[in-house]
Image: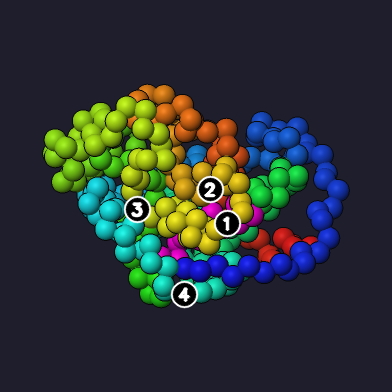
Amino acid sequence: MTVLIEHPEFGIEEKERRPVADSDELVLDEGFVVPANNSYGYSFRDYDAESERKERVEELYRLSHINQTYDFVKRMREAYSSFDRVEMSIWECCELLNEVVDDSDPDLDEPQIQHLLQSAEAIRKDYPDQDWLHLTALIHDLGKVLLLPSFGGLPQWAVVGDTFPLGCALEPSVVHYEHFKSNPDHSNPAYNTKLGVYKEGCGLENILMSWGHDDYMYLVAKQNKTTLPSAALFIIRYHSFYVLPLEAKMVKNPCYSKEGNRVEDVAPEFLCSSYVKQGLVCFLIDVVM
């Protein structure tokens, strides 16, 4: 995908912020309240909660954990590195996500354009001076266009869901870890040891991650010579690698070098991914005015 750069005027900046009433909910510096529960009434990222999406979510992870192999990801990265499918602007790409719902998400069943707008607006409220972070929040999930026919029509398990490293043994903390036993790499001695195909201290950037929208959008940004800072590229590439910030996996696994330990860069977006998923509808006029 080739990105066309446009410079629209986004109107008046946000109005004066209102103080937030006392609450048991977490409140960030700029006053955005982090809800305790998702739109189904459960804790965020609770994959055991008996919600209407539970079976669909688990089936997606079962297929992902069986089919996402080291060789599969190598093939997908090569196939999608030609960037010859379509040329469009960022906003045109955002509009395509009106047609996409993420089956891996236990918290949200709305079109993904809602998640993009919610994320960007929530980040803008809490980090008003970090304009690069506002843009990063808006585009971080654009790689989900891989689900659409014009981008190959990949199955959900090859596009969405938590990402994980391949070519080495996995931590049991990965969502629905039990399904990895059916993955061919699980019984392959080349891939099932702590280091696997990697050398100690090789750095996170040299670890092959499961294929999906994160890696694709990262490749697109690099191909289009983005001027976003390296922290933005880190967020785009690893925002679905949830066990990274939550369990300090870089420290546990010697494959991850200290230079790659940039959890502080990605933390705001991870937080935003959760606290905007509350069933609220973002209207474009409310976002840009």
Give the residue number, with chain letter if any, for mark 2.
233
- Residue 73 visible, this angle: yes
Q: Is residue 237 left or right of residue 22?
A: left
Along the viewing direction, whichever of 182 and 138 lies nearer the viewer = 138
The amino acid at mark 3 is: Trp
Q: Residue at x 34, y 53 (%)?
A: 211
Amino acid at dot 2: Leu
User: Is the residue marked by circle 1 packed among few (<14), some (14-19), or many (20+) residues within 10 Å?
Assistant: some
Place of residue 288 in the rendered image (x, y in percent of width and height, measured from the top left): 74, 63
Upstream in the sequence, badge 2 or badge 1?
1
The numbered mark, 2 or 3, whose residue comes first in the sequence reads 3
Which is nearer the N-term, disc 4 or disc 1?
4
x and y percentages locating residue 215 in the rendered image = 42, 53
In front: label 4 or label 1:
1
> Which of 264 and 175 lies nearest the eye of the viewer?
264
Task: Determine the main secondary structure of the stretch shown in magenta.
Answer: helix
* Residue positioned 35% across, 70% down in the render: 152
The type of residue carrying mark 1 is Thr
Q: Residue at x 59, y 66 (%)?
A: 90
Q: Residues within 10 Å of mark 3 (few under 14, many from 20)?
A: many
Is residue 108 positioned above or below 46 on the image?
below
